[in-house]
Image (cartoon, coloured by chain):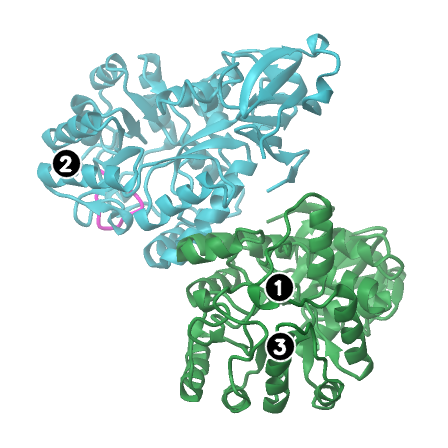
Chain colours: A cyan, B green
Amino acid sequence: MTENAVYKASRVANADVTAWLPDHAVIVEDGRISEVVPQSALAVGISDTHAVHELADVSLLPGLIEAHAHMHTAAGPDPLYTQQAAFNDSKEFFIMRSVDHVRTTLLSGVTTMRDLGGPTDVVFPVRDAVRAGVIPGPRLQLAGAPITTTAGHCWFFGSEADTAEEVVRAIREQVKLGADLIKIMSTGGMFTPTANPRSAQYPVDTLRAAVVEAERLNVQIVSHCLAADGVRNCIEAGIHTLIHARWHDSDFSKGLAYDPDVAQMAADKGIWADPTTGHIMLGDVRIAAGDVPPRVPHWAVSATTVPEEEHDAALRDMRARGVRFVTGLDMGMAHGDFDMSAANAWSFVELLGFTNWEAIAASTVDTAESLRLGSETGAIRAGLSADMMAVSGDPSDDIQDLFNCTDVVIEGRLVKRDGRALV
Amino acid sequence: MPEPAIFKASRVANPANDAWLTDHAVVTDASGRVQAVVPASTLGETPGTKTYDLGNVSLIPGLVEAHSHLHVSPDLNGFANITTESDDRMVMRAVGAARKALLSGVTTMRDIGSRNQVAFPVRDAIEAGVVPGPRLQLAGTPITTTAGHCWMFGTEADSLEDVVRAVREQVKLGANVIKIMASGGNFTPTSNPRMTQYPAETLRAAVVEAERLGIYVVAHSHATEGIRNCIDAGIHQIIHCRWLSSDPTVAMDYDEDGASQMADQGQWVDPTIALQILGAEARAAGAPARKLHWGIAAARPTQEQTLEVLQDMRHKGVRYTTGLDMGMAYADYDKSAYNAISFVESLEYTPWEGIAAATSVTAEALRVDDNVGSLQPGKFADLVAVEGDPSKDIRALARSTDVVKGGVPVKLGGRPLV
């Protein structure tokens, strides 16, 4: 139940997510933030009309926005298990995994989650159940089945469409089923043995037709791209967000084919990128610690694997040219654990040169803007939905404090308090 | 995966669940079973073995809940939901229900009536570690007559031959208990809770078929007629057992000889009386009352009459299982402790008798007592710790702090780990 409430904390993120307001209180009414005031300015007797939650020495932030999940897949440290589960599990198993995963995600502080690809008979019923209050979960924005070529990347939960006409029809079908955005696979990917991550799956004309159709139907379109050819096609076609944004050369014997001029075009067009560095860093940390076996590269990249540092250098250059980044963990893939959305911000600081506050803003207000939800969520600001998370410690000092989620409020409902799940 | 561990507590239930062992430790092995229960002081250095000092708590076997319906919503919308919701939606409800039950301390749960498309996939997912939940013993869909009690999620079978085939079908799908509706029920407007749904010979055929296939049969009955048929048929367990008269102007017609026969035949009863306490507490807190079925609206037994009969049956030797009827209005999935609470507060059980009923006794009735129900070497390390001392205040059972299933902690210090 939503209640009118006051949340008091030592540190409350300001409306721009750039600094703390010390000893402030957030007043929540009818599920929305009505006011953010110094605690000393709270009306005497407010506890007569509002539940007062003394969160004390915590950092109160907007709920995290996770821009890239696959709710039905198994995550975990073993890529083979994750892949086999995605190939073989029943619809019921996918649904049950999803129920568990969206709850876990919410309780880690994520109040909005965008799912970038899952079976339509799984993700839409799960979203509907969350909206109906049957199961707990974040606000969900769904792509439904990703659009891919026959045997292309993620064909086993995708919508296979080879020609421009088929792609346009596939977009219409996903919108009809309830998709909030469109995901299209413009190159192959690591998860799919029958796809080639170094090559484009669609010519620029087809991607352009997809963009035109998505815009006609008022939904965003984002595209998976691991190859320079695919990145270029996406940018020329005006795809709204580049997922992964990796620049592999189509020649197996070469590394990257980064093109600064193309990157500049992305910046000039206002195209966003989801660099998915969080789950890669989590994997690297675990592999270095000896906890899990090293990755087995896809056949198309095994001849010339590219060190992560080279990818990161390209990403940093893209950012320097003005490309803005969203926080997408690729949840559900190996090391994309559903309670690890904070790894996005961590990796932005560690690998991409973000300041702590820039990374916190990326995880909240920036990604909300990219998801076209900026007038609904992403900041602690009067008028927005009361979507908040508290962490112990101060993530502006140590970004890893973002992992220490103690309290979660979604649409004015308190779902976690002092580390304890209430749902 | 389980790893060897030690769970220490101020009070540990003895193997008979009738007294505390003070300052003891449950030692578990890599297969998730109990290796030993020993005084904590006798444990030497145990390097490499994970030790959980649970502190000043009462550590008892995980609760055994004998009566759930995993797929419904435990509120007054239950009937509307069950008639309109998709299987997918019910699977989603069941995932939440299974977690809730486990975290409250239920480590074994018998579901006696959920759609096959819900119950079996959920069990498979729990066993595969995809979602958390208790060990499940399942009936799948209950067997009922056309338009009979719970037809909305049941297998409709009218003739003796239909019933035998329905038993076989449930076994084929993976059922390890059969639920059959011997009378109508409150939940189903098109059924009559005062009348039997099957003649004794049909129920007998179900028992014979189930026994042939190595499992047992439980039967729902509110009606004396249905109870009589269950007694004659040798049904293994009777659910509710309310002795409602077939005459709608007469509340009850309790048959003492029938009760004695039931005791002589070793037939168990799930009296589902915790619902009375939970319902009364919910209504006192402002919840609306449940609508009374037309079949019992005219002459309804008082709570005192019902309890008096249940006490008499017990004195005659009938044994009771737990059975909350989880999923019905007021019977939420984290309320299994109210089985023992109601036995103590309403049926004059001692607290230890209540604790045993909620653990070892019901494990025996479910035929799983070689694996669960008491803290003994060789059984699964299924444990629940509660604040306070339930042998003094049975309501302490509702305050679980720690839960361990198969040697793996799923809740510690009040915090869920799943």
Vertical relation: A319 (above or below) A308: above
Which residue is at the front of the view, B249 or A380? B249
Q: Residues within 10 Å of mark 2 (few under 14, many from 20)?
A: many
Which marked residue is nearer to the observer: mark 2 or mark 3? 3
The answer to which of marks 3 and 1 sits earlier in the sequence is: 3
Instruction: Give amino acid for label 1.
Output: Ala
Please tell me whether residue A204 is drawn above or below residue B187 in the rendered image.
above
**Residue B29 sits in which quadrant?**
bottom right
Q: Nearer the viewer, mark 2 or mark 1?
A: 1
Residue A257: x, y in percent? 22, 27
Instruction: Pick the quarter of the image with the N terminus of chain B.
Output: bottom right
The numbered disc on residue A227 is: none
Gap in angstroms between the C-alphas marked 2 and 1: 60 Å
Residue at 38%, 42% in the rendered image: A70
- Where's residue B210, x and y in %? 52, 86
- Is residue B5 shown to the viewer in this render? no
Residues shaded magenta = A189-200
For disc 1, the neighbor class at 10 Å (few under 14, some 14 to 19, many from 20) is few
Residue tagged 2: A168
Q: Chain of mark 1?
A: B
Mark count: 3
State the SS at label 3.
Answer: loop
The dominant secondary structure in magenta is loop
Name the residue beneath numbered marker 3.
B247
Tell me, yes or no, whether the highlighted magenta stretch contains residue A350.
Answer: no
What residue is disc 1 on? B297
Q: Give residue A156's position: percent from left, percent from top.
A: 27, 51
